Amino acid sequence: MNMKDTSRVIAALLIGAAAGAALGILLAPAKGEEVRDGIADFVNDLIDAAKNKALSTTGNLKDMGNTAYDRAKSKFRTTVNDASDYKDEAINNATAKAENFKDEARDTYNAAKNTVKSAPGQ
C-alpha cells in the first residue's frame, strides 16, 4: 500500500469514527438529551453567526454603494457648476466683444460722416 492509499484509509476511519460518535450522541437516551441540546445550540449559534455576517456584509455593501453614489452626485454637481461658470464667462466675453464692435462701428461711422461733411464742395 502506498502513502496515498494509507492516507485515504486513515481519513475514512476518522470520518467513520466521527460519524459514529455523532450518531451515538444524537441517539443517546436521557443524558444524551443535554448533549443534543448543546449540539442544537451550537448549530443555532452557527446559523446566527452566518446571518449576522450576511447582514453585516449587506450593510457594508449598502454603505459602499451610498458612498459611491454621493461621490458621483458631488462630482456631477461640481461639473454642472463649472459648466454654468463657463457659460456665464462666455456670455460676458461675447457681450464685451459686441460692445467693442458697436463702439468701433460708431467711431467709424462718425469718422466717415465727418469726412463727408468736410469734403470740398459740400
Image (cartoon, rainbow, N blue to C red):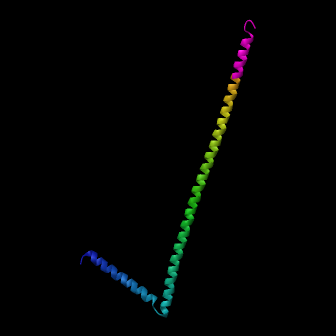
**Image coordinates for residue 38, horizontal then vertical, percent:** 50, 84
Task: Tell me the quarter of the image containing the N terminus.
Answer: bottom left
Please determine whether, in this image, residue 45 is positioned above or below residue 73: below
**Image coordinates for residue 121, horizontal then vertical, percent:** 74, 6
Left/right placement of residue 5 relative to residue 105 reads left
Please determine whether, in this image, residue 23 is positioned above or below residue 54: below
Please determine whether, in this image, residue 11 is positioned above or below residue 96: below
> Please, which residue is most extreme toward the bottom here?
30
Please determine whether, in this image, residue 83 is positioned above or below residue 67: above
Task: Tell me the quarter of the image containing the C terminus.
Answer: top right
Q: Nearer the viewer, residue 117 or 62?
A: 117
In which quarter of the view is residue 119 placed? top right
**Image coordinates for residue 55, horizontal then vertical, percent:** 56, 69
The tally of labels here is 0
**Image coordinates for residue 70, horizontal then vertical, percent:** 60, 55
In which quarter of the view is residue 69 placed? bottom right
The structure residue drawn at horizontal position 33% and vertical position 81%, both measured from the top left corner, is 12
The structure residue drawn at horizontal position 65% and vertical position 39%, both measured from the top left corner, is 87
Q: Nearer the viewer, residue 116 or 70?
A: 116
> Please, which residue is most extreme toward the top here?
121
Could you tell me what secondary structure mostly forms the magenta stretch? Answer: helix
> Please, which residue is most extreme toward the left here?
1
- The magenta region covers 105-122
Left/right placement of residue 116 relative to residue 57 reads right
The structure residue drawn at horizontal position 54% and vertical position 73%, both measured from the top left corner, is 51
Q: Nearer the viewer, residue 83 or 71?
A: 83
Q: Is residue 97 magenta?
A: no
Left/right placement of residue 52 relative to residue 113 reads left
